[in-house]
């Protein structure tokens, strides 16, 4: 069953006379128990999707499309109804763990504040148990420290505990390995594997980190300039990518020789005619600069490319 269904989601930000097209007609669904990954370069529109789901974008953002969570359209909920879902049934682990914690409050107090006053005692018991389970040793001592006294990896686990304390049905994690050292990154892979396997959580994982994506995700959508260009099982997308952009992303990985993608992502105010990727694409033909490719079904997955038979 689908827990989340996103249909034709578009997000624009007004910029003077023009507007920035952050996301263009993105559709995908997240199945119950699945970890769905969104990958793509900086600025491709990953974070704004997560924020749009919970209506956390700035007021000037123009959002179109529908998002169904267990059959309920999140975009038509009243603010009071949304509050019952946000943080409780759908939890967002934000992109910047340092910024998400208040530097002047001890860690324990921050965890406590997740809960309503009357639920704090019970809540803290659950949270401490969760901390132990999620590889945080000696959580009582940790609660007495300030965020800056924790390593990046520890801060991240603390945030994961806070996000999971209401037992949400969907966890959205935005760039959970950003800024972590290699050892903490490995820790994050274990952490998310555990959240997935032992807690059976459904997750939407937004990441640059292809190692994390391959280890944890079941399916992956690749975003380029605000659109999905490829969507399929994680092992297929990362193992036998079809879209020239996905191939480029994989070649740019350190272990594959760090071959950078040449050129720049197009302006989001004036997107190019034809395929948004054609100016950087080594396989580009005349058709690619003239006609914008639609996303289409291909061998069980989805691809947006005129030359989908390319291997
Ligand atoms: N509040 C805003 N006002 C104007 N433009 C915005 C705003 N927020 C995001 N954008 C634009 O929307 C696009 C998508 O941004 P987003 O943060 O989703 O990218 P991302 O894929 O998450 O990148 P990163 O990997 O760097 O986090 C970018 O072009 C960005 O400049
Ligand atoms: Ni982001």
Image: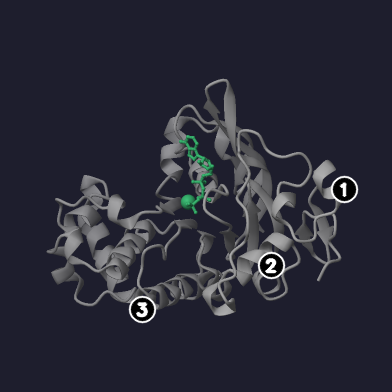
Q: Quadrant of residue 251?
A: bottom right
Q: Position of residue 103 (x, y in %)?
A: 18, 52
The kind of secondary structure element at disc 2 is helix
- Location of mark 3 (residue): 183
- Please state if 29 lies on the left or on the right of 50 as rendered: right
Quick one: label 1, few (<14), some, or many (20+) residues within 10 Å? Answer: some
* Label 3 lies in ligand 1 vicinity (Cβ under 8 Å): no
- Location of mark 2 (residue): 247
Quick one: label 3, few (<14), some, or many (20+) residues within 10 Å? Answer: few
Q: Earlier in the sequence, mark 1 or mark 3?
A: 3
Q: Position of residue 229 (x, y in %)?
A: 71, 54
- Please state if 149 lies on the left or on the right of 227 as rendered: left
> Would you say the residues marked 1 and 3 are in contact, meaning their CB atoms lie under 8 Å apart?
no
The kind of secondary structure element at disc 1 is helix
> Would you say the residues marked 1 and 2 are in contact, meaning their CB atoms lie under 8 Å apart?
no
Q: Nearer the viewer, residue 251 or 109?
A: 251
Residue at point 33%, 75% (across, down): 133
- Location of mark 1 (residue): 287
Circle nearer the viewer, 1 or 3: 1
């Amino acid at each position: 069953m689908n827990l989340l269904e996103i249909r034709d989601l578009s997000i624009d930000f007004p910029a003077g006379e023009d507007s920035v097209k952050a996301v263009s007609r993105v559709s995908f669904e997240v199945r119950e128990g699945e970890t769905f990954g969104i990958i793509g370069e900086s600025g491709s529109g990953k974070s704004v999707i997560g924020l749009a789901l919970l209506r956390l974008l700035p007021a000037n953002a123009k959002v179109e499309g529908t998002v169904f969570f267990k059959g309920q359209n999140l975009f038509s909920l009243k603010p009071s109804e949304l509050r019952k879902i946000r943080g409780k049934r759908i939890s967002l682990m934000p992109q910047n763990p340092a910024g998400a914690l208040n530097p002047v409050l001890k860690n324990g107090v921050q965890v406590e504040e997740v809960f309503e006053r009357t639920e704090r005692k019970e809540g803290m018991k659950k949270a401490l148990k969760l901390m132990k389970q999620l590889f945080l040793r000696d959580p009582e001592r940790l609660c007495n420290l300030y965020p800056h006294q924790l390593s990046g990896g520890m801060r991240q686990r603390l945030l994961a505990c806070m996000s999971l304390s209401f037992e949400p049905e969907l966890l959205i994690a935005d760039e959970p390995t950003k800024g972590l050292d290699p050892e903490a990154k490995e820790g994050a892979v274990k952490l998310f594997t555990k959240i997935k396997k032992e807690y059976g959580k459904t997750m939407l994982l937004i990441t640059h980190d292809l190692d994390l994506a391959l280890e944890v995700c079941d399916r992956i959508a690749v975003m380029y300039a605000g659109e999905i260009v490829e969507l399929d099982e994680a092992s297929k997308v990362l193992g036998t990518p079809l879209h020239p952009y996905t191939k480029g992303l994989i070649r740019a990985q350190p272990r594959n020789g760090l071959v950078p993608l040449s050129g720049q992502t197009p302006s989001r105010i004036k997107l190019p005619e034809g395929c948004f990727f054609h100016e950087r694409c080594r396989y580009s033909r005349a058709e690619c600069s003239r006609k914008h490719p639609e996303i289409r079904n291909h061998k069980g997955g989805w691809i947006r490319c005129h030359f989908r038979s390319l291997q």
